[in-house]
Image: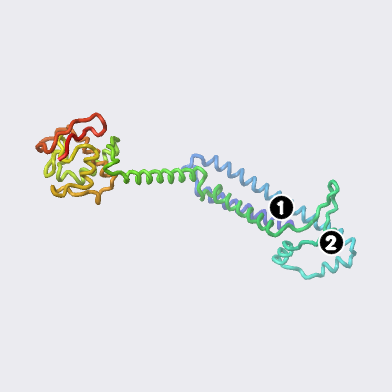
Amino acid sequence: MKNNVLKYFGLTIGLLLVAITAYAQETTPATDPYFYERGFSTVLLIVAGVVILGALLALTHLLNMMVKVQQIKIYQEQGLEAYLQEVKKPQQNFWQRLYKRWTNVVPIEKEKDILFEHEYDGIRELDNSLPPWWTALFIITVIFSVVYLTYYHLTGAGPSSKEEYEIEVKKAEEAVQAFLARQANQVDETTVEALVDEQSLALGKTLWDANCIVCHGPAGEGGVGPNMTDEYWIHGGTIKDIFKTIKYGVPEKGMISWQSQLRPADMQRVASFILTLQGTNPPNPKAPEGVKMETQADTTKTDAIGMK
């Protein structure tokens, strides 16, 4: 028994040292400002593990001694002949002993043979085997706890609670952005509103520079297409009118439909940027075309008086 205790104790200490080495390689003072605090916590965990292991081994040894004492008493009652017969029985291997231990449920009529001598309030302890499923579950939980402790707390291979929280927050933010993108792409000429935030207008300008300056000029002064900086509009100058013109185009005048190339959210950004060109007075503007629109104080800036 003493040799087994030393063997298990040495094996446990070896595994703990391996875990410490892996942790030290994973985290160093140069890369982790909390290295020494974590190292102290690791030492406490190791000490606690050693103490618990020692307590378990001591209890196991004590139980074995109690069982042997009880067996000796039984042999003394039954006589030397019964003891010699027991000794002469063939020895079983580890798995046979384990199986017998798990399934060795003593019948009720023989329970008096496995009663311990000590008594508390008229109750005597019965040295019967625990149910196999209970024993197996206990062993599995102990193994799982060792693996969990090593993976998450000693080696640092698994994410900490803080890291898991940050990962979940990032996933939530991505889900929110995806939802907002879907909502933005559901806008049409009946629900569109002018955007005024800098980011949306900057994206609108990028789309303008990539797709619109060929016909309308870099500053919206006009070219093949009409001037976008004056107060005259051919197809209306509200945000809904401009969005509709971009979406469906004016094929008879060379303005293509952009709904197959731009998302609704992008058409909204371009239309909002076009409204910011009002009154900028670029050089060499094209002559006014269409109907004059009156300036409004709202975010659309203009309101249609008439449509051609």
Disc 1 marks which residue?
57
- Count of labels shown? 2
Disc number at residue 152?
A: none
Instruction: Decide if residue 217 is on the left or right side of residue 135.
Output: left
Q: Residue at x 71, y 63 (%)?
A: 98
Extreme top residue here? Answer: 297
In the displayed structure, 269 sits above or below 127; it is above
Residue 57 percent location from the top left of the image: 71, 52
**Quarter assignment of residue 104:** bottom right
Residue 284 percent location from the top left of the image: 10, 36
Residue 10 percent location from the top left of the image: 65, 54
Q: Which of marks 2 and 1 is in front?
A: 2
Kind of element beneath mark 2: helix
**Neighbour tally class for label 1: few under 14, some 14-19, many 20 plus, Cα within 10 Å:** some
Disc 2 marks which residue?
109
Kind of element beneath mark 1: helix
Q: Residue at x 18, y 49 (%)?
A: 256
Q: Which residue is drawn at 61% across and 43% down?
A: 44
Q: Residue at x 87, y 66 (%)?
A: 82
The quarter in which the C terminus is drawn is top left
Tags 2 and 1 touching, CB below 8 Å: no
